[in-house]
Amino acid sequence: MRGELRVGIVGCGRIADLQALGYLAHPRCRIVAVCDVDGARAAERGRAFGAASVYTDLDRLLADPDVDAVDILTPHHLHAAQAVAALEAGKHVSLQKPPTRTLAELGAVAQAAARTGRVLRVFENFMHYPPHRKARELIDSGAIGTPLSIRLKTAAGRLTDGWRVEASSQAWRVSREHCGGGPTTFDHGFHCYQMARHLIPAEVERVHAFIHWTRLGENAWYDGPALISWRYEGHPPRMGSWEVIASLGMRVRSKYYVSDDRIEVHGTEGILWVNRCTGQLLDEPSLVLYRDGETRAFHDLETDWADSFRLGGIDFVDALLEGRQPALDAAEARKTLAFALAAGRSAAEGREVTIAEVLADAGQ
Ligand SMILES: NC(=O)c1ccc[n+]([C@@H]2O[C@H](COP(=O)([O-])OP(=O)(O)OC[C@H]3O[C@@H](n4cnc5c(N)ncnc54)[C@H](O)[C@@H]3O)[C@@H](O)[C@H]2O)c1
């Protein structure tokens, strides 16, 4: 790798401004190109990011020798083909979560990375959110003893508050064909399944889900409320759950999407709470540790959701410059995707689903 990384952004929609933060902040990185089928949007983002080249056709961006790595920020049904094309064009790839709609699609992307020797990173930003990073550090240092259970909760609120989100950015998400699953339990869910795997050091074995599907129109569905639970492999017995609920009359303080996420992790010797993430629902310290009869609050952490994107972008650049694989690699992303697919299948079939059967049915 040269002394700097030159990035091309593919897909200049809602999330692009946050995704660009790490590249813009890194002293050894430049955004040199952007691409979007919407030419006006591409031109506007290109100006904002200082990109020399603006494309409306991915093939033209991939033929640009000044681009070392591409960041794919498009609807999910395009991810696999675009990532394979980028890898085959010799570019390193950062692919937004969920990486693909199916395990077969992810397998094709992983094979392209192996074949070309280029780096594939699946980007999941919750892992980089400073209170989550600190929670993981505390768990690794034994602060709560042996982790035993995790509980996640996503609370969505009144849709008129928060970020301005274009209708086009919602439209593909409520189409199962374009999204790969529901906007809640598959799209947003990838973060929660990843955190469940990230904060409890064990593999998920079996999943049970209640997901209520609401029909919004022809081929348009919303999946919530939902309650998903799972059991980890091995001993001691460890379990987790994730609940998502929309309170459409409630104001959620948020600069971004009008939802917030909270996590509670119990261990043999203590409890950790992360009290916020996407929004700012509660005025509690972002991270609290209970142990030995004492409660310790962490007040010195960066807590803006955008920080997770900035830090995740910086990590991608550092990893490529240092020649290491950034998280998530294809194998880890595959496990989280299988978890998400198991939840969807469990709700659809009204039974407990094992990760092993989801992988076996995908021939993996
Ligand atoms: N990490 C997070 O928390 C988070 C949050 C939001 C979105 N995302 C992910 O980011 C990705 C994009 O989401 P979004 O909300 O920005 O979507 P969006 O719909 O707002 O933006 C997608 C953009 O892709 C463009 N596009 C469509 N087809 C294209 C093509 N063939 N070539 C180039 N550009 C094309 C669209 O014109 C649009 O501008 C998705 O994978 C989504 O799951 C992640």
Image (tube, rainbow, N blue to C red):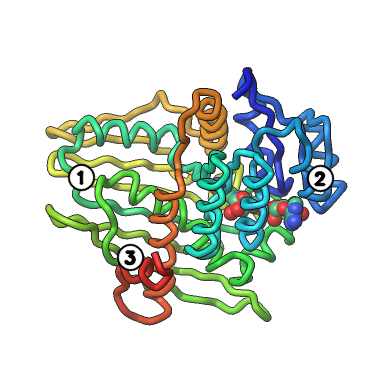
Q: Residue 60: which numbered mark, if any?
A: 2
Q: Badges 1 and 3: C-beta atoms under 8 Å apart?
A: no
Question: 127 or 323, which is in the foreground?
Answer: 323
| Residue 254, above or below 47 | below
Query: Which of marks 1 and 2 precedes in the sequence?
Result: 2
Q: Residue 355: which numbered mark, if any?
A: 3
Q: Residue 147: which numbered mark, if any?
A: 1
Q: CA distance from mark 2 to mark 3?
A: 39 Å
Residue 337 relative to residue 289: left or right: right
User: Who's the residue at 54% across and 54% down the image?
Assistant: 99
Residue 274 relative to residue 158: left or right: left
Residue 237 relative to residue 131: left or right: left
Query: Which of marks 3 and 2 precedes in the sequence?
Result: 2
Tell me the quarter of the picture where residue 244 sits: bottom left
Q: CA distance from mark 1 to mark 3?
A: 21 Å
User: Who's the residue at 47% across and 46% down the image?
Assistant: 281
